[in-house]
Amino acid sequence: MCQQHWQQQPLRLAESAQPSQELRTWVEQAIQSFGAQRLSPREQEITALLIQGLDSQEIADALAISHGTVKNHRKRIYAQLHVSSLSELFQLFLNHLIGAAAD
């Protein structure tokens, strides 16, 4: 039955999932403004890298600081944003992103 259906329908591939430049700019602005009122510029920089998926060692390498320094920054970031995990940080960022979309 499936074979009969698929033979009658042309194969359509999904469009490329390339975000538009407008969407990319909007997300980049949200990343840069996230935590701006509570975090220092360095903490914002580390938070932006966390949100983009870098782990502590990758952040340490990118910023030429020690892994321990990144861990200390993460603890302070979590405390200032009232989160206890990376998943909560992502959730808070998504709420920020949604709020930015509403503005």
Image (cartoon, rainbow, N blue to C red):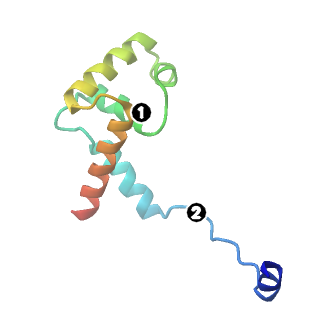
Which amino acid type is marked by label 2? Ala
Q: Which residue is mark 1?
A: 50
Q: Which residue is mark 2?
A: 17
Query: 55 or 6: which is nearer to us?
Result: 6
Instruction: Tell me residue 8's x, y (percent).
Output: 79, 89
Query: 6 or 74: which is nearer to us?
Result: 6
| Residue, far bottom | 8
Query: 86 or 18: which is nearer to us?
Result: 86
Quadrant position of residue 83: top left
Q: Residues within 10 Å of mark 1 (few under 14, many from 20)?
A: some
Q: Name the image quarter holding the N terminus.
A: bottom right
Which amino acid type is marked by label 1? Leu
Q: In the image, is residue 85 above or below residue 25?
A: above
Which element type, helix, strand or loop, lies under badge 2? loop
Instruction: Tell me residue 6's x, y (percent).
Output: 78, 81
Instruction: Tell me residue 15's x, y (percent).
Output: 62, 71
Quadrant position of residue 46: top left
Image disc number at residue 77: none
Instruction: Tell me residue 87's x, y (percent).
Output: 38, 37
Relative placement, left or right, of 2 versus 68 is right
